[in-house]
Amino acid sequence: MAAPRLPWPLPLAASLLLASPAVTSDPDPRPNFLLLVADDLGIGDLGCYGNHTLRTPNIDRLAAEGVRLTQHLAAASVCTPSRAALLTGRYPVRSGMTSSGGARVLQWAAASGGLPASELTFARVLQDRGYSTALVGKWHLGLNCARAGDHCHHPARHGFARFLGVPLSLMADCAGAEPSEKRRGLQRALGGCACALGLAALSLAAGRLARRPAVAAALAASGLLAAASAALGAWVELADCVLMSDQRVVQQPLRLARAAPFNFVSFPSTRGPRFTSPLLYLDPGSHRGAEGLCSRRRRPGLHPPSLPSGPPGVSEGKKEENAPRCWFEPEVAEILHVPRSAGRPFLLLLSFLHVHVPLPTAEAFRGRSAFGLYGDHVMELDWMVGQVLDTLDALGLAGRTLVYFTSDHGGSLEARVGDRQYGGWNGIYRGGKGMGGWEGGIRVPGLLRWPGVLPAGRSVSEPTSLMDVFPTVVRLAGGREPRDRVIDGRDLMPLLLGTAEHSEHEFLFHYCEVFLHAVRWNQWERRTVWKVHFATPRFGPPGAGACYGRGACPCAGAGVTQHDPPLLFNLSADPAEARALGPDTEPLFRAVLDRVRRAVRTHRSSLRAGPPQLDAPHNAWKPWLQPCCGGAFFPFCGCDRLEPPEPEPEPARV
């Protein structure tokens, strides 16, 4: 009998380590790094941060077995600048990954803006030091510069040897769903132009002020614009909802029916073995040929620990009907054995598409929470985290792997349709995604686990930042921080281990685009954290706690209030920012403002802002930069190279 092929429903960690060359050496003593980053997850969505109504046992397990950061802060309240800061350890204003005209994030897969090649990421440092590196999931930091395929901003240019994911982001527009990020606005603009041209043509015809050809041309243009408006949804989906494997487009447009966590679709990569992702799946009930995809056979002589067999909450009686058909297979132990024994550590950034709209959720999790589709989606994310953690444990990698879990920013309060909420909960904290310096948009989960090194169950209330990941990872990997640029992050290990009493961050600066909205002062001698707001967005309608009726709050202009004097909060006593202090209620009011203003001057003197990447023209759609597969040019694109392999025949019974 022929030897069985390697099973293709593999865990994500295997897909990274499969790329490692098989060399013989002693195991490397440096740790592996597994960085788990959720998208739009609110800090109040998790049990370990006080939510007792939504079950997240696997993420809570990280807190119980490791260190929980309770004042962990994103460098921006929206995706692109926050992720740039995470990778580089620098405020996004330094790298140019900000805007000044309201764009906030990269808007198109075919925009020319992106993380400049001059920026140094922790992935590139670790790659240079011999680590196997991979990114799976959301990138949102640019793709091309001058032509389609130059990949000047691609993850590979920033230290990730392997990439499987979306170059932009998951959006409701990828499913033609609401709330729309750009489709609705573009349709309104085109539809308005079409109506205006049509009315003008009819007016001219009625008044006999123009000849028939002019009227006919105006009516034809109106019809074309109306048709373009109707087709715009499909056009946006084709342009921006793209899946890539390494530097190759493998699915265009992205099929959201296959964007949930399990059945772990594997497909041929551009080089080497098959690449598997927990971001993609085939629903056996909705795709042809899916019934025979999963192998349950074990390789001879391999008896690794058993792994989970299903998601939580699925009863035995319904398991066959509702549960996903493919799970982590025991054979992954053998897959991981070669690179592990080769002595090469790994860095894996698992950048989840969860929990961004449109919330594609597998049937096994629908209806499991008390909070509708969003709650179900959070539970699905938690299950995915559990599968990764259980696999690390089963393969004996947990003790050698530093696991980090966070979100790129707070939950989106404006993500709602009618009375249905499709965004997260930020707990007691005011505001949310896109709201400048308010805590709800920037205070995020921060969980770190490293068994045998980090104390279990420890909680750290000192201010920390996503930017701290850079120096922490680089130093643990044996590297050094660059000396030719300012690194704003600080090494987390002294706080995590309890050898330092205070965070090294005396001041943290909270930007909204290029505009400084707020500053946090950690006054060590008084054990007090102050927050000063120079500007805040105006919520609407009156009495609301968000900018409902628009995609996100503005950073400047008429939608922002400039405060003179600034708002002052004592976060140590009032973390919810519910009671602004003044000279009549806080004796240190003037002294705190003076000290913060001096810190702002010092900070600004250190800024050498990079070329702006998120303003026009870098953030406009450029057809010559459009990723396109299966056709000569856009919009004649389309492919799906994720077709499942043929099922293996069952071995003959002896």
Image (spheres, rainbow, N blue to C red):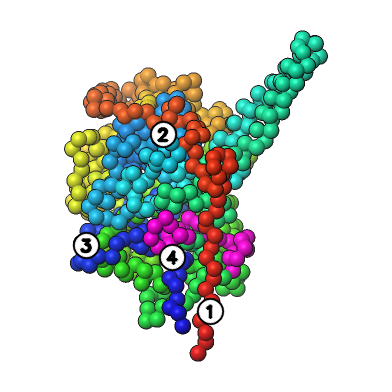
Say if 295 sits above or below 485 in the image: below
Please report whichever mark, 4 or 2, sits nearer to the chain's N-terminal start.
4
Neighbours of disc 2 within 10 Å: few (<14), some (14-19), many (20+) = few
The amino acid at mark 4 is: Leu
Look at the numbered disc 3 and give the secondary structure of its residue. Answer: loop
What predominant SS class does the magenta segment belong to? Answer: loop
Mark 1 vs mark 2: in front: 2
For mark 3, what is the residue? 28
The amino acid at mark 1 is: Glu
Please report whichever mark, 1 or 4, sits nearer to the chain's N-terminal start.
4
| Residue 356, horizontal then vertical, whole percent | 50, 46
Q: CA distance from mark 4 to mark 3?
A: 24 Å
Q: Are marks 1 and 2 in contact (CB under 8 Å)?
A: no
Left or right: where does residue 496 sit relative to residue 153? Answer: left
Point out the stretch of residues depicted in magenta: 267-291
For mark 1, what is the residue? 650
| Residue 652, horizontal then vertical, whole percent | 52, 84
Q: Residue at x 58, y 65 (%)?
A: 290
Q: CA distance from mark 4 to mark 2?
A: 37 Å
Q: Residue at x 75, y 21 (%)?
A: 216
Left or right: where does residue 143 sit relative to residue 290? Answer: left
Q: Residue at x 48, y 70 (%)?
A: 309
Please report whichever mark, 3 or 1, sits nearer to the chain's N-terminal start.
3
Q: CA distance from mark 1 to mark 4?
A: 19 Å
Q: CA distance from mark 3 to mark 2?
A: 40 Å
Say if 582 sits above or below 372 in the image: above
